[in-house]
Image (spheres, rainbow, N blue to C red):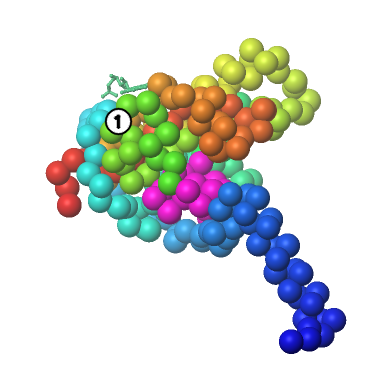
């Protein structure tokens, strides 16, 4: 069979794309950005009730969160609550917004993009078992990983590396508490995890050196819920 010049070029392009996908170890398998549904601002418990019920739980059912619940969870964690300024549900020092939320799901690893309220695919691989060092982490359907991007902590005020660690840990605390309160409001289980194998997880996530894993936080239904 004789290939025309155009078909030969097309064939070469397909081969090149396949080689690039292979080189990125499966990242091409899940290309599409996932647009999350609009957050539901009027549901949930009263703040005082949620505070009363906020707690750490380490036993998860494998039941998946609905798309709506995942959307609400991420918006509550650090979504944009003032579109005119782009500011978020959690404060950050100097409004650096340096904490990225990575979302580990069965279908792969995603980056939460707050301005577009969507999930950007990062890896087409289930990395939930690496989100923490305790065995329950793989049971939770959602593993949130809070990653500080030190490169974003710049501008008129240039903090030292010591200050970057202090501010990014503080800023993560607000996000983690938003997640705790959202979970209390929705009857979900969650636990903030400092015990994380950071070098190994950073390698799995292919993070840049200026990106630092601060905490992770699995979220799911309490064990026993089907
Ligand atoms: C920064 C931070 C790190 C934590 N790290 C872990 C952890 O690695 N593993 C764990 O099982 N619990 C961890 N926890 C959960 C605490 O043990 C828990 O918050 C504490 O026992 C108080 O319980 P409560 O959250 O129900 O009030 C962490 C909590 C925080 C705030």
Q: Quadrant of residue 154?
A: top right
Is residue 153 placed above or below 220 in the rendered structure? above
Q: Quadrant of residue 193?
A: top left
Q: Is residue 28 left or right of residue 58?
A: right
Is residue 8 placed above or below 47 in the rendered structure? below
Instruction: From the viewer's side, name the closer residue of 26 and 120.
Output: 26
Q: Residue 183: horizontal and vertical position, in percent?
A: 30, 40
Q: Is residue 86 left or right of residue 63?
A: right
Q: Can residue 78 be seen by looking at this rendering?
A: yes
Q: Residue 12: horizontal and vertical position, in percent?
A: 76, 69
Is residue 118 in the magenta section?
yes
Instruction: From the viewer's side, name the closer residue of 162 and 212.
Output: 212
Is residue 52 in the magenta section?
no
Residue drawn at x 70%, y 66% is 15
Secondary structure mostly taken by the magenta-highlighted segment of the chain: strand
User: Helix or strand or loop: what does disc 1 sit on?
Assistant: helix
Residue bounds of the magenta highlight: 102-125
Furthest-front residue in this view: 1
Q: Quadrant of residue 77?
A: top left
Residue drawn at x 61%, y 35% is 207
Q: Quadrant of ligand 1?
A: top left
Is residue 1 placed above or below 157 in the rendered structure? below
Q: Residue 190: horizontal and vertical position, in percent?
A: 31, 35
């Amino acid at each position: 069979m004789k290939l025309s010049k155009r078909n030969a070029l097309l064939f070469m392009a397909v081969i090149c794309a396949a080689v690039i996908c292979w080189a990125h170890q499966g990242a091409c398998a899940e290309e599409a950005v996932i647009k999350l549904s609009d957050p539901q601002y009027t549901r949930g418990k009263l703040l005082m009730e949620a505070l009363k019920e906020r707690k750490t739980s380490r036993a998860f059912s494998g039941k998946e969160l609905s798309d709506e619940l995942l959307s609400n969870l991420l918006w509550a964690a650090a979504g944009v609550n003032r579109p005119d300024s782009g500011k978020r549900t959690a404060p950050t020092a100097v409004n650096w917004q340096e904490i990225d939320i990575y979302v580990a799901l069965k279908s792969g690893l995603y980056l939460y993009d707050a301005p577009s309220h969507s999930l950007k695919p990062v890896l087409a691989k289930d990395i939930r078992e690496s989100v923490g060092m305790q065995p329950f982490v793989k049971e939770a359907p959602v593993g949130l990983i809070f990653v500080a991007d030190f490169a974003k902590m710049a501008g008129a005020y240039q903090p030292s590396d010591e200050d970057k660690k202090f501010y990014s840990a503080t800023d993560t605390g607000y996000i983690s508490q938003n997640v705790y309160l959202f979970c209390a409001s929705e009857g979900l289980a969650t636990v903030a995890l400092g015990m994380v194998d950071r070098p190994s997880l950073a390698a799995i996530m292919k993070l840049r050196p200026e990106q630092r894993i601060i905490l992770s936080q699995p979220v799911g239904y309490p064990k026993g819920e089907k």
